[in-house]
Amino acid sequence: MGMLALNAGAQDRFYIEDFSIAPGETCTVSIMLDNQTAYTAFQTDIYLPEGLTVEQEDGDYIFGLTSRKARDHNIASQLQTNGSIRIMSYSPRINAYSGNSGALVTFEVTASVDFTGTAVMALRNTLFTTTAGVEIRLADEVCHVTVPVTSLKGDVNGDGFVNISDVTALINYQMSNGAITIVEDNADMNDDNDINITDVTILINTVLKTVD
């Protein structure tokens, strides 16, 4: 067991940059390592927001190491009882990851078809081991995952589709005097710069005429 040096690597970061993803889309996510210290191994817990899933193969999560790994670096993952996914990587020969910045781990996430708004993905309980066998705990990190706003007329909730959910969102918006968030450009169905009952009527007729 190595010596534990809490927060000794405060200048180092292991994090995911903010990114956007459309409902139903799959995209590649990178975990970045900015480090002044030479590290040989790490573990971290990824907390995913509801509606995002990590790609799997034969029941195993697919995480990969970038070219910053040494030839003998391994990576493994396991679902935890609290719903997070623990990732571990190590070098049997105690080789260090190369470089001082850039992506170290990549994986693919898929958004559900009803994934909307902005959500938070977190990395917690991150622990790295130095070439001297010292364990260094890095700060928890969060990234914001957003759904890009679409310019689809009638897509009031911005999920990329026009359906009854948009009618509900528009009615709730009207009843709350604008207190809830909608994509206002998409909600102004007749482009008169005023969102009112006329737009609700047009949207209902649009949904009724929509062919899947």
Image: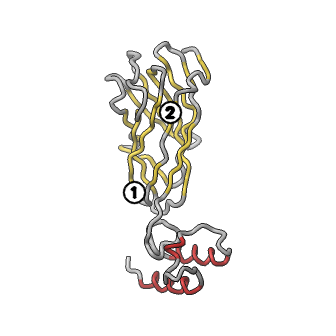
The residue positioned 54% from the left and 38% from the top of the image is: 123
Task: Tell me which amino acid carries mark 1.
Answer: Glu
Q: How far is disc 1 from disc 2 in space, using C-alphas?
A: 25 Å
The residue positioned 57% from the left and 80% from the top of the image is: 194
Counting from the top left corner in percent of width and height, residue 150 is at 44, 66
Of callouts 1 and 2, the N-terminal one: 2
The quarter of the picture where residue 47 lies is top right
Counting from the top left corner in percent of width and height, residue 187 is at 52, 76
Q: Nearer the viewer, residue 212 or 196?
A: 196
Q: Which mark is residue 14?
A: 2
57 on left or right of 199: left
Q: How many marks?
A: 2
Name the quadrant of the N terminus: top right
- Label 2 residue SS: strand
Counting from the top left corner in percent of width and height, residue 71 is at 31, 23
The residue positioned 44% from the left and 69% from the top of the image is: 151
Farthest-out residue, front: 193
User: Mark 1 or 2, which is nearer the eye?
Assistant: 2
Q: Are marks 1 and 2 in contact (CB under 8 Å)?
A: no
Q: Nearer the viewer, residue 157 or 44?
A: 157
Task: Tell me which amino acid carries mark 2.
Answer: Phe
Assess disc 2: are there few (<14), some (14-19) or many (≥20) residues with their C-alpha within 10 Å of its C-alpha: many
Counting from the top left corner in percent of width and height, residue 166 is at 52, 74
Q: Classify 156 as above or below 74.
A: below
Q: Which mark is residue 25?
A: 1
Farthest-out residue, top: 132
- Label 1 residue SS: loop
Name the quadrant of the C terminus: bottom left
Q: Classify 151 as above or below 17.
A: below
